[in-house]
Image (tube, helix red, strand yellow):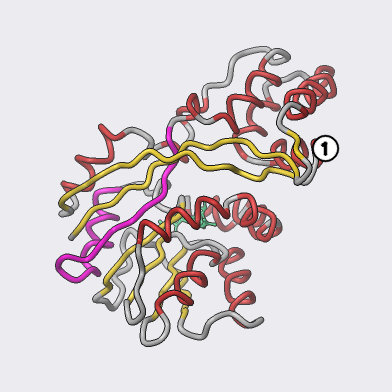
């Protein structure tokens, strides 16, 4: 996983950071609302990537508070540091390390993560390490995906592109969905020492593009839709993309194209 986030996926996210953060704005806002950060709090942002939520959280805990963002991806952390240097809050710091095993000097009041906890190879160990940095009673607040089948931003491209594929693509096995089932998440966090585990299903709009062509281009470049396109023979790709654009046209408004996403806001206490 560390290698993936330092090579292909990490470089892709880093190159497209501003765009992706615009798409995921609603998720970040929902996460931070649930976290209810207060000035003076110490926060850990797990799998912080290019630092968008770290820097937003840092502004919310000032004055007196601070945020550490931890991530394994060097290219994404380079973007995070550059963002901070170009006018971001000074009370954020970024650490290049594996959150599964790297103990951070807490105690933190809150650990947050926007889609940064689904890629652990040993999730119990990882959440035990994260919990170890929280003060007693400290909060864990995560955004994770609900399953692909209830996520219109994936089912819409899946239906349009799937007609042209040689075989159906099952997205459920992708690592981004490893924490999409409450039956998995609740016992996982309990084993890692957390209490009062709750998953609240939330539906948020993803602004995937400024118009239909822009939205189709963005979606075609994201991991899950790329995987669906890869199942289409070369000769059918143009027709698949035309069907994707036609499906997106039904969601085009004056300010662009929005598709709905289904996420969990997972909360627990130490
Ligand atoms: C889907 S991205 C989300 C990034 C960021 N939270 C955001 O919302 O833009 C997942 C992030 O988790 C990081 N990650 C994966 N495994 C990790 C680990 N074991 N320790 C720290 N970060 C990890 C990746 O490098 C990547 O930045």
145 relative to 94, above or below = above
Whether 127 is among the magenta residues is yes
Q: Nearer the viewer, residue 204 or 82?
A: 204
Quarter of the picture containing the C terminus is bottom left
Report the span colored magenta.
Answer: 123-146
Q: Residues within 10 Å of mark 1 (few under 14, many from 20)?
A: some
Q: Nearer the viewer, residue 202 or 16?
A: 202
- Residue at left 44%, top 30%? 147
Q: Is residue 175 left or right of residue 64?
A: right
204 relative to 156, above or below = below
Where residue 135 appears, as percent x and y from the top left, is: 19, 71
Where residue 144 appears, as percent x and y from the top left, is: 42, 44
Q: Is residue 79 left or right of residue 267?
A: right
Quadrant in the picture for residue 99 = bottom left
Whether 116 is among the magenta residues is no
86 relative to 25, above or below = below
Where residue 42 appears, as percent x and y from the top left, is: 32, 76
- Residue at left 22%, top 66%? 138
Where residue 238 appears, as percent x and y from the top left, is: 85, 24
Q: Nearer the viewer, residue 263 or 104?
A: 263
Q: Is residue 229 left or right of residue 97?
A: right
Task: Find disc 1 in the rendering and name its residue.
Answer: 213
- Residue at left 70%, top 20%? 160
Quadrant in the picture for residue 253 = top right
């Amino acid at each position: 996983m560390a290698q993936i986030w330092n090579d292909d996926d990490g470089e892709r996210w880093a190159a497209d950071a501003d765009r992706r953060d615009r798409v995921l704005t609603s998720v970040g806002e929902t996460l931070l609302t649930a976290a209810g950060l207060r000035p003076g709090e110490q926060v850990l942002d797990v799998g912080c990537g290019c630092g968008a939520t770290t820097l937003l959280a840092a502004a919310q805990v000032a004055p007196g508070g601070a945020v550490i963002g931890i991530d394994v991806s060097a290219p994404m952390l380079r973007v995070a540091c550059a963002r901070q240097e170009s006018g971001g809050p000074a009370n954020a710091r970024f650490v290049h390390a594996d959150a599964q095993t790297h103990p951070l000097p807490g105690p933190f009041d809150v650990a947050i993560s926007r889609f940064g906890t689904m890629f652990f190879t040993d999730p119990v160990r990882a959440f035990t390490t994260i919990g170890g940095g929280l003060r007693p009673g400290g909060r864990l607040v995560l955004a994770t995906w609900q399953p692909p089948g209830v996520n219109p931003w994936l089912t819409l491209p899946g239906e349009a592109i799937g007609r042209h594929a040689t075989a159906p693509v099952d997205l459920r096995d992708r690592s981004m969905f490893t924490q999409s089932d409450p039956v998995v998440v609740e016992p996982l966090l309990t084993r890692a020492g957390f209490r009062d585990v709750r998953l609240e299903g939330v539906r948020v709009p993803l602004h995937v593009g400024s118009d239909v062509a822009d939205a189709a281009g963005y979606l075609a470049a994201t991991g899950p839709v790329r995987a669906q396109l890869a199942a289409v023979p070369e000769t059918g790709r143009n027709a698949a993309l035309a069907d994707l654009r036609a499906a997106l046209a039904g969601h085009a408004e004056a300010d662009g194209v929005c598709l709905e996403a289904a996420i969990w806001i997972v909360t627990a206490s130490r």
